[in-house]
Amino acid sequence: MLDLIIRNARLAGGSEERVDIGCKLGKIVELGARINEKAEREYDAKGYLVSPPFVDSHFHMDSALSYGRPRINRSGTLLEGIELWREAKPHLTSDDIKKRALQLCHWAIAKGNLAIRSHVDICDPSLVAVETLLDVAKEMKPYIDLQLVAFPQDGFYRDPNAEQLLIRALDKGVHVVGGIPHFERTMHDGSLSITRLCEIAAERGLMVDMHCDESDDPMSRHVEMLARETTRLGLQGRVAGSHLTSMHSMDDYYVSKLIPLMCEAELHVIPNPLINITLQGRHDSYPKRRGMTRVKELMAAGLNVACGHDCVMDPWYSLGSHDMLEVAVMGLHVGQMTGQSEMLDMYRSVTFNGAKALGLENYGLEVGCNADFVILQAKNEVEALRLRPARLRVFRRGISISETPEHIPSLTLDGKNVPINFTLD
Ligand code: FE2
């Protein structure tokens, strides 16, 4: 007997046909037009979309939900955000970080996000955020995968203590090596930081995810160096470049050389559309650059592009509810990716591609995959992007862990109740 059957599902990435999904011991064990077996629990998906869970490939859990502390970012710029965070950091306590992180995780789960890669600032001698978020990751493991990146926010070389703090964070169990080469004092220091951080990752068999070229500087060259060091150290497929906003401003000739180097290194590319569109181009009058990396071209070259939310209500961004559909929608607008297949590509950027960037195992909607999925009140991925609909149920290892009622608004016209259907039948 099966533990769970989802009936009448339309699968993300699949055809329009309805299928049943059979699950046992936390895995998908059967997929078919009609499963005749019985199960302990059955849910009727009513022809709605069943998607693998959303994945946020780039986030900052330690600062999430701290909006207004110690004061509001008046300019809205990246640099004022960094300054505010520096002021707020000495006052962080474990209780406060944990409370905010758990609340964010709850929001994420309710939106169908069951994996988050979060950078955690290690430029703090107490490493309180590191210890607290490792604790949160353990506590929330039955519900959500929280992968942590050791992130030297104040600069790996600008902060003289960063290297030993980063090593301590990795020793405590932080999963990924981070960096911020464009924030070092010079391009040369940035390059040196990439080399050292990639060597640390290679020595320890870890993945790398660096904030890289997060500027409007067309001459920023750190992703080139990241690709070079990835290949030199044999880290292909284990390294991600986050943001890469300077690629938006680079000249096309240089990019024609750069993208093949990135392909050679099998880099993962992690844009953050909500944040990139608001923080970049701030020094421009008009025309204003959009500041998002070249998603369409990078995808066309075969690179894995996985989008992140980056911030929710923190010194850098005052909005957000941790809805990865909002991220994908912003990304497809900014990148002018409104073709049908391009919209599906953007949906994949917050699902399958994210799972690949994070190295998640048994992710997907095939037999043998974890029974992790979300039922959305939409018929297909494009409709999900258009409506950002209710996540009716979220399953983790075959167990329902979140529920949102089906939402059908209605009008009263001539005294009659008229339900509103936002789809075109
Ligand atoms: Fe970030």
Image: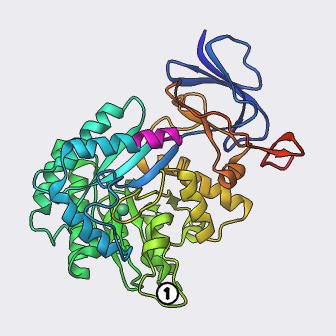
Query: In this picture, is 398 found above or below 270?
Result: above
Task: Determine if residue 359 is in view.
Answer: no
Quarter-wise, where is residue 29 in the image? top right
Q: Residues within 10 Å of mark 1 (few under 14, many from 20)?
A: few
Q: Is mark 1 within 8 Å of ligand 1?
A: no
Of residues 62 and 67, the one drawn nearer to the viewer in this rendering: 67
From the viewer's perspective, tell me whether residue 76 is left or right of residue 111. Answer: left
Q: Residue at x 15, y 53 (%)?
A: 167
Quarter-wise, where is residue 300 in the image? bottom right
Which residue position holds label 1? 251
Query: In this picture, is 16 found above or below 197?
Result: above
The answer to whether residue 341 is magenta is no
Q: Residue at x 29, y 38 (%)?
A: 136
From the viewer's perspective, tell me whether residue 413 is left or right of residue 391. Answer: right
Quarter-wise, where is residue 45 in the image? top right
Q: Residue furthest right?
A: 414
Query: In this picture, is 87 found above or below 137?
Result: below
Q: Position of residue 282 (x, y in %)?
A: 43, 82
Of residues 314 and 158, the one drawn nearer to the viewer in this rendering: 314
Q: Position of residue 41 (x, y in %)?
A: 61, 15
Amino acid on which disc 1 is placed:
Asp
Magenta residues span 105-114
Q: Position of residue 345 (x, y in %)?
A: 63, 57
From the viewer's perspective, tell me whether residue 201 is left or right of residue 375. Answer: left
